[in-house]
Amino acid sequence: MKKLDLEELLFKVEKPARYIGNEINAVKKDLKDVNVRVGFTFPDVYEVGMSHVGMHILYYVLNKQKDIYCERIFAPWTDMEACLREKNMDMFTLETHSPIKDMDFVAVTLQYELSYSNILNILNLGKIPIKSEDRKEEDPFVFAGGPCAYNPEPLADIVDIFVLGEGEEVLLEMMDSYKKWKGTGKTKKDFLESIAHIGGVYIPSFYDVKYNDDHTIKEFEPKKEAYPKVITKRIIENMDEVEYPDKVVVPFIDIVHNRAIVEIFRGCIRGCRFCQAGMIYRPMRQKSAKTITESAKKIIEATGYEELSLSSLSTSDHCEIEGIVRGLMDEYGDKKVGLSLPSLRLDAFPIEIIEQIQKVRKTGLTFAPEAGTQRLRDVINKGITEEDLIGVVKNAFELGWTTIKLYFMIGLPTETYEDLDGIADLAGKVIDAYYSIPREKREKGLNVTVSVSSFVPKAFTPFQWHPQDTIEQFREKQSYLKEKLRNKNIKYSYHDNKTSFLEAVFARGDRRTTDVLIKAWEKGCKFDGWGQFFEYDKWMEAFDECNIDPHFYVNRKREYDEVFPWDFINVGVTKKFLEREDRKARDEELTLNCRVKCAGCGINQGLIGGECECLK
């Protein structure tokens, strides 16, 4: 094994702790005892990647196997990249500082479409050919998973293997097959053949795509009958039995989320029509209060964190959330361990929970009305009212909170300027709620942040057929809101509309966009999600040079019978259900949450073959 000497480089970079490894709880193994090496790659900087709970879970699951060594790889910041290229040194892992080309697998998590150029950069720095067809027998396999993998096609010529769904079980099945193949002298294609039947595994090189004259997809077919026509996602059915780390790596530097994280359930009962996660992660599966509290105890003891976050898509929807919060606060309140509850629902936000949290420390409260008017909230099936919001924030103000963040989205289907006015009106009513409380009963320093993102139509959502607003339309709406939200108590922030445009291209792109991605990277594009690096003009040049119209993927309406690049994937939620939900959106009709009434999404018919947990 070749170990790179990084000492000289570390003196030349801004944050050397991003690269040294050897943190508390980092896994150390003797390579003589290791049969399979996996480089788990998060295609962004260390501080972002180390905040991702999925990375910690899979790092734990793989390293629990004695003969598998999972090492971490993060995108190097520009200063470290310059050093590596100047010295002609390879991209490396954190655990052993080995060249990443020494790995058996380079595993990439796909959390955000604008990180795709970083994947190419990491492979190139590691001297691994970018296209799978150019890799030799001695090169690592590149596999990928995560939410963006549910439209894998923009990376189909780059990634050897996609894993669709939850990875804890399928990764170990892949590793077992690899151990049997390794050392046999058979080809890499033989290995791919051996895992093509594993549920959730998609090998893009085993499939052909044909196109119509209008550039839409005509058909998607496996090259052999032995390859599955439909790839079904993997799920973990029993969340109390799933592997979860009893300790996690503790960084030497501040990261985005400096806290212990305990996952409390997967899936969501709500069915917001713009939300991909709410569809692809179905069905909802909870961990028991006992499992959650035991996990919290182990992680806090192993890390020393002073904040604990309960992670899920909608934390207040856990059936036992009040008891869990009370138990954790009773256990850790005196030890000054604060509790963070992201993703709280306005209509399921017991005041008792607020009171429990604020006993240790008050952080800001974040809520997501998403739309400014009730009409548009009904269109997107948000299922909350203005009264829900005002009631909750007034209670919070009475308990001493002064910092509130409100998340909205612009460009949603059927949106009008009256809906934009509603955003400003709602923010104003939050301020009025604060000032309605007698001065002696409220804390000073009201701060209301209105954060506005741009709607990006995503695969497997009821809005997957809708066009995105043009860049010009987004710009006009953002400027309009800026004028409407002029208030000393309001901080207004919004997303770059050009990055949202590019995100939409790759969210709904097909295999033809791969060449654009490579061309843009060759022009120097990377860290596209970071405003200071995003170069829109270079991306547009890449589209022109590849003769690809990005507006084809972003700004046109689809018909219900169009074949999507992801139609060969079964997430359990049927296309008929998504179409039905889109029609209900047009009629401004709500669908009740799964706990109240089954919406017939199909998840309990084909994927789990029984009653959903939320209906039991």
Image (cartoon, rainbow, N blue to C red):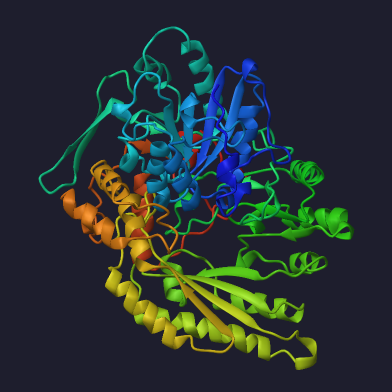
Please indicate whether residue 423 sits to the left or right of residue 268 in the image. left
The answer to whether residue 253 of the structure is visible from this angle is: yes
Front-most of residues 509 and 389: 509
Front-most of residues 343 and 103: 103
Residue 480: horizontal and vertical position, in percent?
Answer: 38, 83
Residue 208: horizontal and vertical position, in percent?
Answer: 23, 30
**Residue furthest left as drawn:** 213
**In percent of the image, x 40 and y 19: which residue is there?**
138
Front-most of residues 157 and 373: 157
Tell me how many marks there are. 0
**In percent of the image, x 50 and y 11: which residue is there?**
180
**In percent of the image, x 22 and y 56: which residue is there?**
541
Please indicate whether residue 574 sits to the left or right of residue 435 in the image. left
The answer to whether residue 599 of the structure is visible from this angle is: no
Which quarter shows the N terminus?
top right
The part of the image, by quadrant, that contains residue 202 is: top left
Q: Is residue 413 above or below residue 51?
A: below
Residue 105: horizontal and vertical position, in percent?
Answer: 48, 27
Q: Is residue 508 above or below residue 164?
A: below
Q: Is residue 97 above or below residue 194?
A: below
The part of the image, by quadrant, that contains residue 133 is: top left
The part of the image, by quadrant, that contains residue 358 is: bottom right
Please indicate whether residue 127 sits to the left or right of residue 512 in the image. right
**Residue furthest top as drawn:** 184
Residue 368: horizontal and vertical position, in percent?
Answer: 54, 68
**Residue furthest right as drawn:** 334
**In percent of the image, x 73 and y 52: which residue is there?**
320
Which quarter shows the C terminus?
top right
